[in-house]
Amino acid sequence: MDWDYLRYIHALASGGTLARAGDILGVHQTTVLRRLDQMEEQLGVQLFERTRDGVQLTAVGETAFNEAERMRQDMDSLERKLMGQDARPAGKVRLATTDTLLSCLINPILSEFVAVYPGIQLEVTTGNEVLSLSRRDTDIALRPTNEPQETLIGRRIGVIESAIYASADYINDHPPFDPENPEAEAWVVPDDSFSHLATNRWYRKHLKDTQPVIRCNSLYGMYSMICSGTGVGVIPCYMGDSAPGLKQLSPPLEGEGTDLWLLTHQDLRQMARVRMVLEFLADKLRELQPLLEGRVREGH
């Protein structure tokens, strides 16, 4: 059996039509049809049922597809391992993080890195979801999470603490903040898309009967509105304590911290350029522990 048949079986099953399989493989759909006919004739079995809407796996085809999927995963693993043999600190490294960590914490670190290691090209993507490193969508993820993916390895940098903040303008226009009566304030809060945040426990306990002035699906958007005086809100201390116009109205909220992780795939950790970025970020971020933990303004 020609091993290349498995590529065609996988593409046909994934695409569902000859045209989409051709797009996946980079060939014309007539080539896909010709190869399918060759496979079934050579093997003496029917791998796909051909319908008006496309193709569907037969029971025999499912067996072939499962083997094709296993081989695809093996090839992905082999590629990562071969890439991991690269000993040169040069090339592209893809870093995934959140918009807030990028804008409010690591921008200066990345600027310093590219100055020190000009041979490494960083490709940074932001988003609140954790991309799948097993699929090699990215090489390194810097994420706040208390449950990192089991398939990844990484370094726990520290704990991101959060506190209540408001702008000087808001404070000047309202009575003094009463921690025993937080419902009296105008609150800016995250919407349901942030239900995974550890701080949601605090919201449910202390603001369950409060109607916020604004709900937002962006932590950076909340930060911007708090800075502009729209209301008070709970944001990470590394954001609030870095903004000169914000005042911390509470100590870090007890029991609401989130671990900060640097994560990568085990097959990539020995790649020189990935290891270089990991070590540089880890060292620099550990220097920022007081900022992460809300200890910058202690005593104020």
Image (cartoon, rainbow, N blue to C red):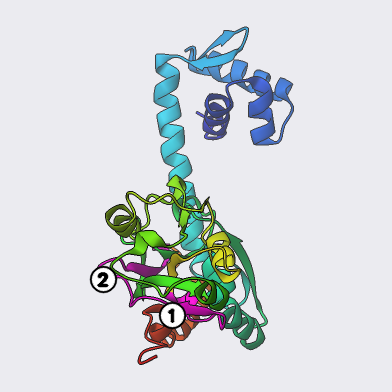
Q: Which of 229 and 32 is in front in this view?
A: 229
**Drawn side of residue 230 relative to residue 293, left or right:** right
Q: Going by the picture, which residue comes out furthest to the top?
A: 52
Q: Residues within 10 Å of mark 1 (few under 14, many from 20)?
A: some
Secondary structure under tag 2 reads loop
User: Relative to the observer, which residue lies in front, 236 or 3?
Assistant: 236
| Residue drawn at (52%, 35%) of the image | 3
Q: SS of the residue at dot 1?
A: helix
Q: Which residue lies furthest to the bottom in this view?
A: 299
Residue 54 lies left or right of residue 258; in this view the side is right
Which residue corresponds to mark 2?
254
Q: Where is residue 132 in the image (x, y as percent from the top left)?
A: 46, 52
| Image height of 66 relative to 244, above or below | above
In three-dimensional space, the C-alpha distance between marks 1 and 2, rounded to whole angstroms, equals 25 Å
The residue that mark 1 highlights is 282
156 is higher (above) or lower (below) than 144: below
Question: Marks 2 and 1: in contact by CB < 8 Å?
Answer: no
Sequence order check: which comes first, mark 1 or mark 2?
Answer: 2
Three-letter amino acid code of the residue under disc 2: Glu
Image side of residue 22 versus residue 186, left or right? right
User: What type is the residue that disc 1 sits on?
Assistant: Ala
Q: Which residue is drawn at 51% across and 15% down?
A: 56
Q: In which quarter of the image is the C terminus?
A: bottom left
Q: Is 78 covered by the magenta stretch? A: no
Magenta extent = 237-266
Residue 70 appears in the picture as rendered: yes
